[in-house]
């Protein structure tokens, strides 16, 4: 009987350790909504990052996403909710948890917050469900 090389076995174990979760229809719809809003910032020279974050948010609750940002860049964080009756908001906090001043855009199931950090480091973006019932959201961000 022929033994498998250890490297092949390691790759099989590594691949088996990853689980792929397909996005739900609601998350896909929320991402479309977020990308529609982010497209408006592209007209001002912002580039949308490839990555995105999807999840579920409950009424009067929030979802936090940690991001590393760089001083000198400008950022817009755009979020969309799948539920058209939802009202969401986006806020940004520094590494100590203090909310930073942002330009905001709130339009029901679409919301965005934009700012230029004075210091490079870790920040936290909050997506808050202000009105509506529990549902899916998606967050994307743009920079220049």
Image (cartoon, rainbow, N blue to C red):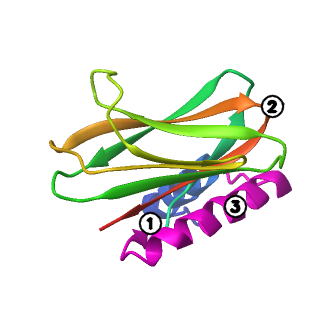
Residue at numbered disc 1: 49
Tell me which segment is drawn in magenta: 19-48
- What residue is drawn where x is 55% and y is 62%? 3
Residue 74, picture quadrant: bottom left
The Cα atoms of the two marked residues, 1 and 2, are separated by: 26 Å
Task: Report the side of 78 relative to 122 (left or right).
Answer: right
Q: Position of residue 5 (x, y in %)?
A: 47, 63
- Give the total of numbered labels: 3
Q: Position of residue 143 (x, y in %)?
A: 35, 64
The Cα atoms of the two marked residues, 1 and 3, are separated by: 15 Å
- What residue is drawn where x is 83% and y is 49%? 84
Residue at numbered disc 3: 33
- Which of pointers 1 and 3 lies earlier in the amino acid sequence? 3
Residue at numbered disc 2: 134
- Which of pointers 2 and 3 lies earlier in the amino acid sequence? 3
- What residue is drawn where x is 28% and y is 38%? 122
């Amino acid at each position: 009987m022929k033994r498998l090389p250890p490297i092949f076995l390691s790759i099989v174990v590594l691949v088996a350790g990853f689980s792929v979760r397909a996005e739900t229809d609601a998350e896909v719809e929320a991402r479309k909504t977020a990308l529609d809003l982010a497209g408006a910032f592209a007209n001002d020279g912002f580039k949308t990052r490839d990555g995105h974050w999807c999840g579920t948010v409950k009424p009067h609750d929030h979802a936090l996403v940690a991001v590393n940002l760089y001083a000198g860049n400008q950022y817009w964080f755009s979020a969309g909710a799948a539920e058209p009756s939802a009202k969401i908001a986006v806020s940004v906090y520094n590494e100590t948890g203090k909310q930073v001043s942002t330009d905001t855009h709130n339009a029901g199931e679409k919301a965005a917050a934009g700012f230029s950090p004075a210091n490079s480091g870790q920040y936290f973006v909050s997506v808050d469900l202000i009105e509506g019932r529990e549902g899916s959201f998606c967050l994307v961000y743009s920079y220049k």
